[in-house]
Amino acid sequence: MELFLEEMCFEKDIETCLDVWEEDYTGWQKELNNLKNSEEVNFVNLPFTEKYITQIKEWWEKNRGRFKYYVNLGIGGSSLGGKALVRSFTPLHRWESFGEDGGYFFMENVDPQDMKILLEKIPLEETLFNVISKSGTTVETMSQLMIIWEILEKKNLLTTNLIFTTDPVQGELVSIANDYGIKRFEIPPQVGGRFSVLSPVGLIPAIVAGIDADKLLEGAREVVEKTLSSEPSSNPSFIFAGINYNGWQMGRNIVVLMTYASPLNFWGDWFVQLWAESIGKNNGRIGVGSTPLRCVGVTDQHSILQLFLDGPRDKIIYFLGVKKRDEDVSIPSIFREREKISYLGGHTLSELMKVEREATIKALKEKNIPAGLIELESISPKSIGRMIMFFELSIFYAGKMFNINPFNQPAVEEIKKYIYGSLGRKGYEDYS
Amino acid sequence: MELFLEEMCFEKDIETCLDVWEEDYTGWQKELNNLKNSEEVNFVNLPFTEKYITQIKEWWEKNRGRFKYYVNLGIGGSSLGGKALVRSFTPLHRWESFGEDGGYFFMENVDPQDMKILLEKIPLEETLFNVISKSGTTVETMSQLMIIWEILEKKNLLTTNLIFTTDPVQGELVSIANDYGIKRFEIPPQVGGRFSVLSPVGLIPAIVAGIDADKLLEGAREVVEKTLSSEPSSNPSFIFAGINYNGWQMGRNIVVLMTYASPLNFWGDWFVQLWAESIGKNNGRIGVGSTPLRCVGVTDQHSILQLFLDGPRDKIIYFLGVKKRDEDVSIPSIFREREKISYLGGHTLSELMKVEREATIKALKEKNIPAGLIELESISPKSIGRMIMFFELSIFYAGKMFNINPFNQPAVEEIKKYIYGSLGRKGYEDYS
């Protein structure tokens, strides 16, 4: 993975803007190194932890023959990473598909229509349901569990077609699993939802979808090692954080991530949660944090790009691209006499996407709008493992710069009391 | 449709903030009225224009028997409205599905993998391809046309399975249609892409998907009539524009639209284009325009909401909800002994979505963050027609307030020269 810094234009040059943290840097690197060497599993040493892959593979080898469909029941961090990962390697006809080739569903939302259709159309016997909730009390996910529980129980499929991914020792899912003999996988207690894609939360859907999980971790490990031994000026995660913090201070309160490959689009949503929930905090005096905006290239060139180019200078814009696509489609050389379109013949769609991405970056640079390119070698487990860790480590540095704790989410915890109150949960009568 | 103003909290009360335009209002209403009475079709009188529906229905009645699949080839305004409309009334198992029940595809992007799978998997004989481009030169759409043209030609399906939606008199699609006998529908010349959902651009996919297009226009007509006869204080489109403009002036440069019903989610993307491309402009001195951000409720409560609640006060947040859902799913009353989840039993999923929406609004209000509710009666063509016109008319007023032309998109036109140059189009050699 490469972060092309020369593509960025800024008010100050990058070195100057990173200089302010020169004294802090050594301490931060030490802290990261401690996380890596910690005995407790955390987001930094997660890719060095092989036991989960072994457990999942062993279980999957015994059970894979029975399943054509996979339904992920989880929301937020219990969905976004696994969803982005699986879509990266799943062709269109197997995505949310009830067709004969099987399909993968990530039912994050509790929309009644979608849920109804899912339950009507999916062949239950051939479906693996994975309920993911660290606490075992997530309102949306537990509602979904109760709905499918009744259905699976009637068909005697509870112990065969249902698994839980949850805390190793506590919570309702642990207790239900123990009572009814449901297969259960662990979420490491120190790993928060939005950092959990390399834990069983993301590894189960990945392995079920046939993704090489070892390569995924290998890519992530590389980035951890490289980051730990990097000088500030060659540390992409540190630079990404620094650019965004500096930009924010100068009024650039929007950080755009524009993906230029359909299989990668959901990484935009994953990044939104990672950045927003980690950095969007009150630092004790004021609210801090830039707002992440995920866009889809080339599509959104025909939508929001007009605003990026001519509107206020309140954005930093990153492009997520791929150097080489495995598959391509050629545009045939037809309509030769029609000058206004004939030039398209002989090109390929992946060329077109690249040319449009480059044209957009060029136009932004001409207007002195900060635009950076994050380019993967290919859509491969290793490249994606690298990208995941690049972004996750950037959160560590950004937390330091914004001077907040990037690992909690106090405000969303607050809202839950109103939801509990309205739904009549005991002990929350005051909030109804 | 209702816009609940009492749900909004502001630095100033709404009346005060709208007062500044008291003198302009009569003139703006007159201008709108002129648009309505204009002989040229424009976005205001489009819902009063019945000829397109008649033409499309007539053609569809003769041809519907042959098609199970619909593929929309268009990007930006040639896709977003139709896509949102069709998804509003299409259950999950027919969305981007190759299954026996048929499916609707909106291929906006030129991703090679998606395109390859589409062409491999779709039964060509049973598929209607609709190529939409006003100019007939859109790079992405014309590339797609060239790819499917070769395939359809070989199977002798050009005149039977392909239609064009384009300018009535000029451009490559008109010329190709005339040369080869391709069925062609019109985009009214004065209607821009992002305002075209009630023209054949949106009406064809709507009618193909079995949506009652007459009701759609009826809803839109109602809103035009009501808006024209409204005082400022009871004109939702005017108020929406005024709130956003005032907010923007006070540093709220992000306008969030959070949809609380999966079938409505793509209206978020439609709104993003409508707002960003219309209002994101240089007014001659500076860049203006707030940045639209589309979110999905309840899902994004577990993602970006932490930032909304605790982060900087730079947002105005609208919720798009539905009063009554036709379909619902009950959560069974099981796990009665488990207090932490048993309270969920007996509720329904649509209740859950509503409760969560209300809890979120409440939490935002407690922190004095502006939060407004736009609530549809139901997911019906009439309600959606109303909503479309509500947003479109708000653009008219916002254009006045931001003092820019909301109907052009100069910057994206600029980028095209680089794309043409890189791809070798004649006359653009200087931009390669």
Image (tube, coloured by chain):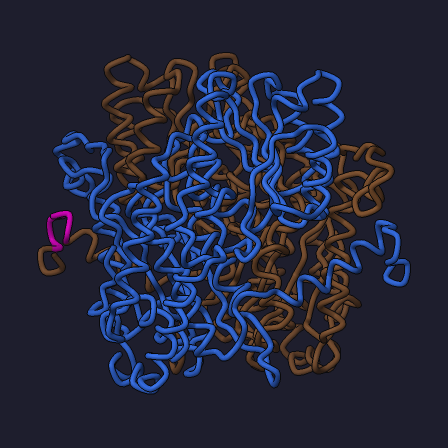
Chain colours: A brown, B blue
Which residue does the image show at 80% across and 59% down from the upper left? B418
> Residue B240: percent from the left, percent from the top?
34, 69
Viewer can see residue A48 = no
Which residue does the image show at 24% across and 33% down from the upper left? B327
In the rendered image, which quarter is residue B227 located in?
Answer: bottom left
Viewer can see residue A339 = yes
> Residue B128: percent from the left, percent from the top?
56, 26
Residue A238 higher or lower than B321, as above or below = below
In the rendered image, which quarter is residue A24 located in?
Answer: bottom right
Q: Is residue A251 left or right of residue A173?
A: right
Q: Is residue B47 left or right of residue B363?
A: right
Which residue does the image show at 43% across and 64% down from the upper left? B35
Which residue does the image show at 43% across and 75% down from the upper left? B314
Residue A425: within the magenta?
yes
State which quarter of the image contains the C terminus of chain B. bottom right
Along the line of sight, the residue nearer the viewer: B267 or A414:
B267
Q: Residue furthest left?
A: A429
From which residue to which does the magenta span run? A422-428
